[in-house]
Amino acid sequence: MKTLLISAVFAAALWTAAAPAEADDCGEVSIAEMKWASAGIAANFDKIILEKGYGCSVTIVDGDTLPTFASMNEKGTPDIASEYWINSVRALLDQAVKTGRLEQGAEILADGAIEGWWIPKFIADANPDIRSVEHALKHPELFPAEDDPSKGAVYNCPADWSCQISTANLFKALGGERNGFELVDTGSPKGLDASIARAFENKVGWLGYYWAPTAILGKYDMTRLSFGVAHDKAEWDRCTAVAGCLRPEVNSYPVSRAFTLMTRSFASRDDPVTTYLRTRKWDNATINEVLAWQDENRESNADAAMHFLRNYESLWTKWVPADVAEKVKASL
């Protein structure tokens, strides 16, 4: 802890003085590129900043949630996972940090990964009384089902996703069917996205499950509704997330937290670089915009990272000292 405090103070002094911050001994660095787009983009802008700003030599390697954690924890490689969702490995991560194998960097998703039921903003604006799921379920006429407009529709998430279970249980707990709604199986992620696209094209209401950060929420202006209660983890584990639960209660979705993970051997070798990795984070609104650009233009994670660095300079330049920012900008 004392070493970390000294490093933080030293890094702060460098920033204040705007002295050169290149990591002369940065050397070889490996970064896991996870399989979802926001994490892949983060891995690639980390690569650019570390190479162009700090003089590192960076290799991107394939990553996924459990294999990457196991490899970093047991083998000490890769050095960095830029965006790692920690909820599923919380106990294991705490133990790895405690025993000195891994370190936790910045909470890169500043808002967390958010799940919930959403409606188009144009519906929310036209109906200011609808601010909760309970309010929305009083108005099936505003959210007509495509196959039977006499009923309202709640669009569920794809089959075999855990959110399909929780959404079905919440629909039951809230009396969706009793209120004149049907739960619509969208079949696939593309089916869910297409249902939102059609609603916006036709300017009709849409109510259903979605999550952030995502390209869809960067493309379409949506409002997340409150469930009127705080997240109850005990109830979630007992029933909300359990298929076929007989007596579900109203609950809220948990916020999934995503951090940067580093191996201890890497984190202890270069203060300027690890200071950056403990500092930088971005919000869901920005991520949604970048993901939407990537989706619309069918670009790679590396291209989306370049797009972010070229178009969001006011954000990322706050993450690094001025001399590092100038080197990165000169390379773009």
Image (tube, rainbow, N blue to C red):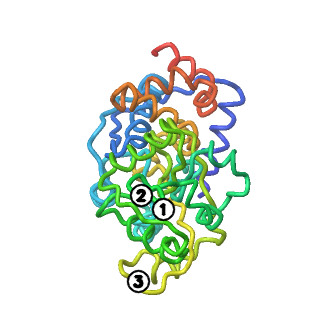
First-in-chain label (3 vs 2): 2
Q: Is residue 53 left or right of residue 16?
A: left
Q: Are marks 3 and 1 in contact (CB under 8 Å)?
A: no
Above-or-below relation of 279 to 328: below
Q: Residues within 10 Å of mark 2 (few under 14, many from 20)?
A: few
Q: Is residue 83 left or right of residue 227?
A: left
Q: CA distance from mark 2 to mark 1?
A: 6 Å
Q: Amino acid at mark 2?
A: Asp
Q: CA distance from mark 3 to mark 2?
A: 27 Å
Name the mark on residue 302.
Answer: none
* Circle 2 residue: 148
* Circle 1 residue: 151
Mark 3 vs mark 1: in front: 1
Rendering coords of residue 163 (x, y %): 41, 64
Residue 194 occupies quadrant: top left
Quadrant in which the N terminus is drawn: bottom right
First-in-chain label (3 vs 1): 1
Q: SS at mark 3?
A: loop
Q: Amino acid at mark 1?
A: Lys
Residue 61 occupies quadrant: top left
Rendering coords of residue 227 (x, y %): 61, 67
Name the mark on residue 245.
Answer: 3
Q: Are marks 2 and 1 in contact (CB under 8 Å)?
A: yes
* In-front residue for pair 153/232: 153
* In-front residue for pair 111/50: 111
